[in-house]
Image: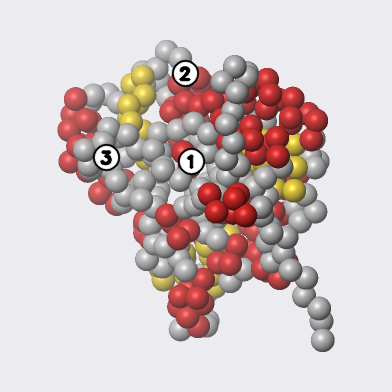
Amino acid sequence: MTETLALPTLPAEVARVGFVHEDVDPTLDLFEEIDRLKRETNSVLLAHYYQEGDIQDIADYIGDSLGLAREAERTDADTIVFAGVHFMAETAKILNPTKRVLLPDLHAGCSLADSCPPDAFAAFRAEHPDHLVISYINCSAAIKAQTDIICTSSNAEHIVRQIPADQPVIFAPDRNLGRWLIKETGRNMLLWDGACIVHEIFSEQKLARLKGRYPGAPVLAHPECEEPVLRLADHIGSTSSIRRFAAESDAQTIIVATESGILHQMQKDNPGKTFIAAPPDNGCACNDCPHMKLNTLEKLYLCLKHGQPELHMDEAIRVAARKPIDRMLAMSEGVS
């Protein structure tokens, strides 16, 4: 009989609230303190484009899911601090089992990942045993462990086009990205019915009116958006692709249909241009991801100071989840 070692446990208070709860001296320069703690602990700070501007400004690397996965794979830091959401920190741990991975707030989840429960997905797969499973990286480690190939919005089309035409495919968990891929590649796929709350919030009617008000402004949209919004877009791509398009475009006014955090880098890249967030279909004038915005500069400082919350993972799941990520990285050479 093989002995199974229990995973380390978090301090009770951190496990309960999801982060280190401690008053922070308001006179502290948190930028200086975070830099000092990173040096002292040999930590690297990876941040997604959807984080608040202050966190992006202090990060060692800012990127989309593909770039962050690549950066996590090659870092030589002892500790990876992930300013993003839970599945992103999980990906870093999958790729770096011997390194400590910290997430400023463990409750920074993902509505898309939550829309694909592992048990339900296992039953879905069992109904289609001949299908190859391609899963969007915005899913839990438990879903990755049930997957043949992982993809991101940067490389999804590139990966789908490499699959033999006679191979049936399940695409999970984002139905909107899946529908866009079917349209772009002509490849029929069986879709899991999941979605991101942020990218389904945009209003087609309000966006059409905004285009009429700014007739020369291109609309840049993420493929997680619903099809009516994508039909109004002049460019559809990942956050990195959207950022590149904005820099290369001659347009001085640009409408952006994705989480508003990307506007911070786009404005820094292009100080002379005007960026307008696509309007949501609600009474709020913002397109923030409530999960991404759980991370704050204060939580990041306390995370580095105490080395908590630390992400732990079952080793069997980690090993199984690593295989489809490795396949993705091998199939994505040349994709940026």
Q: How many marks?
A: 3
**Mark 3 or mark 2, whichever is nearer to me:** 3
| Residue, disc 1 | 294
Q: Is residue 100 above or below residue 174?
A: above
Q: Quadrant of the C terminus?
A: top right
Amino acid type of the residue that numbered disc 2 sits on in the rendered structure = Asn
Residue 248 lies, in percent from the top left, at 47, 25
**Mark 2 or mark 1, whichever is nearer to me:** 1
**Disc 3 to disc 2, C-alpha distance:** 24 Å
Residue 2 lies, in percent from the top left, at 82, 81
Q: Would you say residue 186 is visible in this rendering?
A: no
At numbered mark 1, what does the secondary structure look like: helix, strand or loop? helix
Q: Upstream in the sequence, badge 3 or badge 2?
A: 2
Q: Which mark, residue 307?
A: none
At numbered mark 3, what does the secondary structure look like: helix, strand or loop? loop
Residue at 64% across, 32% down:
301
Q: Which mark, residue 280?
A: 3
Q: Residues within 10 Å of mark 2 (few under 14, many from 20)?
A: some
Amino acid type of the residue that numbered disc 3 sits on in the rendered structure = Pro
Q: Residues within 10 Å of mark 3 (few under 14, many from 20)?
A: many
| Residue, disc 2 | 270
At numbered mark 2, what does the secondary structure look like: helix, strand or loop? loop
Looking at this view, name the residue that lies furthest to the top: 272
**Disc 1 to disc 3, C-alpha distance:** 20 Å
- Do the residues bearing badges 1 and 3 touch, measured as CB atoms within 8 Å? no
Residue 94 lies, in percent from the top left, at 69, 57
- Foreground pick, 68 / 39: 39
Residue at 71% across, 70% down:
316
Q: Upstream in the sequence, badge 1 or badge 3?
A: 3
